[in-house]
Image (spheres, rainbow, N blue to C red):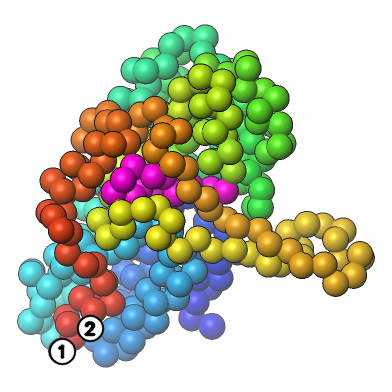
Amino acid sequence: MKNWQEVLNLIERFNVYSSTEVTFTALDTLLQIFREASGLSEALKDSEEFLRGLFSIRPTSVMTLNVVSSLLLGLENSIGNSTSLKDWIDELDARVSSLTKEISSKTNTVATLGARRIKDGDRLLTCSYSRTVKALFSRLREEGKSVYVYVTESRPGGEGVALAKELGRMNFPVELIVDSAVRFFMKDVDIVVVGAEAIAANGAVVNKVGTSLIALAAHEARVRTFVLATTDKFSPETVFGELVKLPVLRDTSLLPGLEKYGDINVAAPLFDVTPPRHIDTIVTDRGVVAPEAVILLVKELYGWPPASIDPLSILRKLFR
């Protein structure tokens, strides 16, 4: 098995949590594919298979789609006529490094803007595992703000447990709660902060399943919900979040002990869609916007109507 196939297995098993982590992994893997290839044709074949598998496994990761497309378009403009594998590797190395720094810079900007809206002593609730949310807490720690954090387990996958551990190591007081207890604890919460897998043009947010219930409970309790996301996660091709394909796992191992009860079906969606009416603010690297204003940012970033993005077509065009 090739290394990139092992990477796909890790992502498919949800061992790579956040959309940002998936994007960084994709960039590093593409660079590694070229480094290990014996020639450009092998690099093309393996890259195409890797990307096709990746977008099939993680169709919600709009950030990965946008960033990989940006990478390939940049290569087309700078080195598209070269047949030297070394030239491609050098150019890829430089561009992957640049994109990684750019994403990290945007993430830090989002964290800084988000931290301005959180007061010392606030009680926050979050879910899943978001690199951007983690950056927010790092910023709060730098500013000396003490906050209490509720973190949901975030099943299936339970990546909320990993986030809770990391926040605990940052010396925040953390309370890990079961997903079904969100409404019970909402009366004690000042602000909900969540990341995003994708943001649709109408302001709907695709994130780990359970986010929509958290936002609904917060809306009912008049608790503000902040979504933290870089503009790389904006989807220029969709108007409604429901148009983003949401994967559903059907593995009985997700519910330990269930197998002994016989032939019972399991359905475990990985993501859901939170409507814009249940979101108060989206904090981006371009500023803080209301969900209704997302379409203006999409127009600014991608034009209108936005052009269709197909990284596989760009990749094939590079090697004509």
The answer to whether 245 is drawn above or below residue 277 in the figure is: below
Q: Residues within 10 Å of mark 2 (few under 14, many from 20)?
A: few
Q: Secondary structure at mark 1?
A: loop
Task: Compare residues 28 and 146 and report the one nearer the observer.
Answer: 146
The answer to whether 169 is drawn above or below residue 273 in the figure is: above
* Residue type (three-letter) at the residue carrying disc 2: Arg
Q: Quarter of the image containing the N terminus?
A: bottom right
Residue 222 pos. (x, y %): 51, 19
- Write down the residue under mark 2: 316
Task: Compare residues 147 and 231 and report the one nearer the observer.
Answer: 231
Residue interval drawn in magenta: 197-209
| Residue ID at (56%, 20%) | 221
Q: Secondary structure at mark 2?
A: helix
The answer to whether 1 is drawn above or below residue 137 in the figure is: below
Please indicate whether residue 299 sits to the left or right of residue 170 in the image: left
Residue 239 seen in this snapshot: yes
Residue 162 seen in this snapshot: no
Residue 52 pos. (x, y %): 39, 77
Q: Are marks 2 and 1 in contact (CB under 8 Å)?
A: yes
Where is residue 89, by image quadrant?
bottom left
How far is the residue under mark 2 from the one under mark 1? 7 Å
Residue 91 pos. (x, y %): 17, 67
* Residue type (three-letter) at the residue carrying disc 1: Arg
Residue 146 pos. (x, y %): 51, 13
| Residue ID at (51%, 13%) | 122
Q: Is residue 289 magenta?
A: no
| Residue ID at (17%, 59%) | 306
| Residue ID at (47%, 43%) | 274
Please indicate whether residue 279 sits to the left or right of residue 284 in the image: right
Q: Quarter of the image containing the C terminus?
A: bottom left
- Write down the residue under mark 1: 320
